[in-house]
Image (cartoon, rainbow, N blue to C red):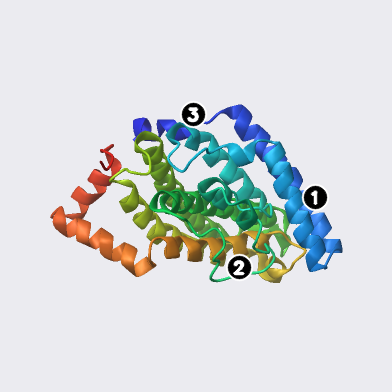
Amino acid sequence: MTGTLQPVLSADPMVRDAAGRAFTDLAADWFRHEATSPDDGARTQKRRSVLDAVAELGFADALASPDAREAWVDAATIIRAQARSAAPIDMAVLLATGDRPASIAGDPSVYECAIDAGAPADAQAAIALALGRCLQICAAMEAALDLSLQYVRDRKQFGRPLASFQAIQHSLAIAAEELAASTALSDLALACMVREGCASVRLPGLLDAAALVLGHAIDVVYDASHQVHGAIGFTREYPLHRHSLNLLRWRDHLHRLRSGELRSAERLGDAALQAQGVWSTVTALMKPGDRHD
């Protein structure tokens, strides 16, 4: 397993640090502006300025094409950094499709169930965008859990930190387990992309599995994080809602990219039947394979 995930774990530390700082600063500036500028035109202009900043930093050119295998390590780092910060630019759309207007078309403060912006033009872009969604979802779940852990450490009830209550510990532990499973699966899909590219015979199956695993994990993380926060988690002033909205919209889009959650399950079931067992299917997905000709 370590060998399979090695490409993921060897991301350039300079890219990781630069992306983390840049998107944190861009997001902070955006949210300050959002709080004082309710005008839609001003908000749209501000999103354009964020896109310009991302382009100036070179992040918009991190992936020359969806099948640029070696570039996916750094591209994944940039996608994750954007998702953790909740910055108002969709790096998965930007890098997978190259569509700059689509990457800022959606209002990050509004939940949109059926986002048509950034629709992939071909099969490779659809695969790349689905992988990008998986990376974003895991990063957003991580951010939501980080907020939750900090909140229960700081908030006291009956003279004790919330973190000391067993029920809260249990709830967040289960959420952390779901995040770990989701991250491992997304990392495996990323490693597959780095090794084999969009034409990999394994990658569609890994993305189908991710659509199911991440879809369930979002429910668990969403419920746990909002339960421990109480009403404050839904307010505009507190950052949790930003990640919650992103998780819901990105899950919808991931399922649409994979033709629906049920269709993903059917394809995995068909593969298990052909392999004459679930374990054979799982091990086949985890082993490096060949590209489509």
Q: Position of residue 286 (x, y in %)?
A: 29, 42
* Left or right of 61 on screen, residue 131: left
Per the model, the C-alpha gap separating discs 3 and 2 is 36 Å
Under mark 2, the amino acid is Gln
Find residue 29 and name its label: 1
Find residue 21 and name its label: none
> Is 264 placed above or below 99 here?
below
Q: Residues within 10 Å of mark 3 (few under 14, many from 20)?
A: few
Q: Secondary structure at mark 2?
A: helix
* Left or right of 26 on screen, residue 165: left
The answer to whether mark 3 and mark 2 are in CB contact below 8 A is no
* Left or right of 222 on screen, residue 280: left
Q: Tell me the residue at 47%/57% (across/down).
A: 174
Count of residue discs: 3
Is residue 36 visible from the viewing direction of this image?
yes
Q: Which label's residue is closer to the chain start, 3 or 2?
A: 3
Q: Position of residue 47 (x, y in %)?
A: 73, 55
* Left or right of 51 on screen, residue 62: left
Q: Tell me the residue at 43%/64% (across/down).
A: 255
The answer to whether mark 2 and mark 1 are in CB contact below 8 A is no
Under mark 3, the amino acid is Ser
